[in-house]
Image (cartoon, helix red, strand yellow):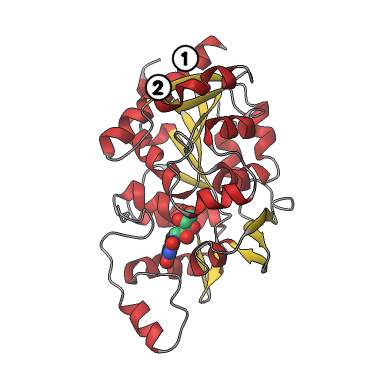
């Protein structure tokens, strides 16, 4: 099937996931790409509703993302943070002057009665983003980390404490009471869908919260189309910094086999890097189809190429099903 008839729903969280979404946005018309965003990283900070993974998707697709950090904007200034710091305010979570507008406007929209889905639609539209960015739920879900120092909110743990505390467990607070957002569920049940793609986000931090939301995992298993995941880990590493430490502390085997183990009841296909060719048979024995390519995304060409590869592989699985 020609690329521009292909339709995909994508699950994405974090910086890594947004890279593949940008690649997919290069090859698919906006109406054929719908992204279900993790909201487990969300938190209220300085009285503002911050939704990092939604904003990373909006900024990335708007061409505004900070290329070095992956979060926040590249055209940023920091006067607000400097002034807040002078006043003894919390400056551990860096809110740029332009980024601040995003959180203030989201708070206005939510206070005005908009759902998170509707507010996100409004914010994305304001920045010229055509692709649908769909929060996994309009109810609050919060990723918490159990540590020896007690239970911490994700941003407290990950940013304020620089992921130093030793992690004992990850919890997705509120997920069992949260229903999948209507738009997100509709995207997973869309007629004519070629497949569902799970972006190369960290499964335990960025995809698990989405799957924990009531209705999402069953929508994936009920869907008649293939589900393809892209491994965020290459040769046991490639996840930068604290996340690798967190996985280790949780006793989660890093590497593509750990990824396959985690997803094995949910996915039909897994895209791994050629550097992990030795693990192909082990993963295929789990009943997962494996495709291999260079999965490292440094520039837009890489992102577009990987998007074409993943879309093509998923279309093949669809044709074979
Ligand atoms: N990550 C940091 O490591 N330090 C920060 O100061 C920081 C600020 C920030 C502000 C807005 C936003 O949308 C994201 C921000 N992030 C920051 C990233 C955030 O912690 C995300 O949750 C991670 O990128 C994981 O998805």
Q: Are marks 1 and 2 in contact (CB under 8 Å)?
A: no
Q: Secondary structure at mark 2?
A: helix
| Residue sitting at x 51%, y 54% | 118
**Position of residue 309 in the picture relative to residue 75 (left or right):** right
Q: Quadrant of residue 304?
A: top left
Q: Residues within 10 Å of mark 1 (few under 14, many from 20)?
A: some
**Neighbourhood count class around disc 2 (C-alpha, 10 Å): few under 14, some 14–19, many 20 upward:** few
Locate ligand 1 by image quadrant.
Answer: bottom left
| Residue at 61% in and 54% down | 138
Q: What mark, if any, has residue 77 been given in the picture?
A: none
Residue 36 in percent (x, y) is at 52, 43
- Label 2 C-beta lies within 8 Å of the nearest ligand 1 atom: no
Residue 312, position as x, y percentages in the image: 41, 20
Q: CA distance from mark 1 to mark 2?
A: 14 Å
Question: Which of labels 1 and 2 is toward the front?
Answer: 1
- Extreme residue in the top direction: 320
Q: Could you tell me which quadrant the C terminus lies in?
A: top right
Q: Position of residue 264 (x, y in %)?
A: 64, 28
Left or right, 192 with reference to 224: left
Residue 100 can be seen, yes or no: yes
Residue at the outermost right position: 177
Q: Which residue is mark 1?
A: 316
Q: Nearer the viewer, residue 178 or 91?
A: 91
Q: Earlier in the sequence, mark 1 or mark 2?
A: 2
- Can you give x and y, in whole percent of width and height, for residue 152 in the image? 63, 65
Q: What residue do we see at 57% from left, 34% from top?
A: 259
**Number of marks in picture:** 2
Q: Is residue 58 above or below residue 98?
A: above
Q: Which residue is mark 2?
A: 5
Which one is in front, 132 or 317? 317
What is the secondary structure assignment of the residue under circle 1? helix
């Amino acid at each position: 099937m020609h690329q521009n008839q292909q339709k995909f729903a994508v699950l994405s969280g974090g910086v890594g996931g947004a890279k593949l979404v940008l690649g997919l946005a290069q090859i698919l018309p906006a109406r054929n790409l719908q992204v279900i965003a993790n909201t487990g990283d969300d938190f209220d900070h300085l009285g503002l509703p911050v939704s990092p993974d939604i904003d990373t998707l909006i900024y990335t697709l708007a061409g505004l993302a900070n290329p070095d950090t992956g979060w926040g904007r590249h055209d940023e200034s920091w006067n607000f943070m400097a002034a807040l710091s002078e006043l003894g305010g919390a400056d551990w979570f860096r809110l740029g002057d332009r980024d601040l507008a995003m959180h203030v406007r989201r708070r206005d929209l939510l206070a005005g009665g908009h759902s998170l889905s509707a507010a996100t639609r409004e914010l994305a539209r304001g920045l010229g983003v055509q692709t649908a960015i769909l929060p996994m739920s309009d109810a609050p879900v919060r990723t918490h980390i159990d540590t020896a120092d007690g239970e911490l909110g994700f941003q407290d743990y990950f940013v304020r404490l620089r992921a130093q505390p030793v992690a004992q467990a990850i919890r997705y607070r509120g997920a069992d009471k949260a229903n999948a957002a209507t738009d997100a569920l509709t995207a997973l049940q869309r007629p004519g869908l070629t497949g569902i793609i799970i972006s190369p986000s960290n499964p335990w931090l960025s995809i698990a919260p989405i799957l924990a939301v009531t209705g999402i995992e069953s929508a994936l298993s009920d869907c008649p189309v293939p589900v393809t995941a892209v491994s965020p880990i290459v040769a046991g590493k490639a996840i930068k910094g604290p996340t690798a430490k967190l996985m280790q502390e949780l006793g989660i085997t890093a590497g593509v086999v750990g990824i396959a183990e985690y997803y094995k009841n949910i996915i039909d296909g897994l895209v791994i890097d050629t550097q992990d060719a030795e693990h192909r048979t082990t993963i295929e024995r789990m009943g997962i189809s494996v495709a291999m390519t260079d999965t490292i995304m440094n520039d837009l060409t890489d992102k577009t190429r990987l998007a074409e590869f993943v879309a093509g592989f998923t279309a093949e699985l669809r044709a074979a099903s």
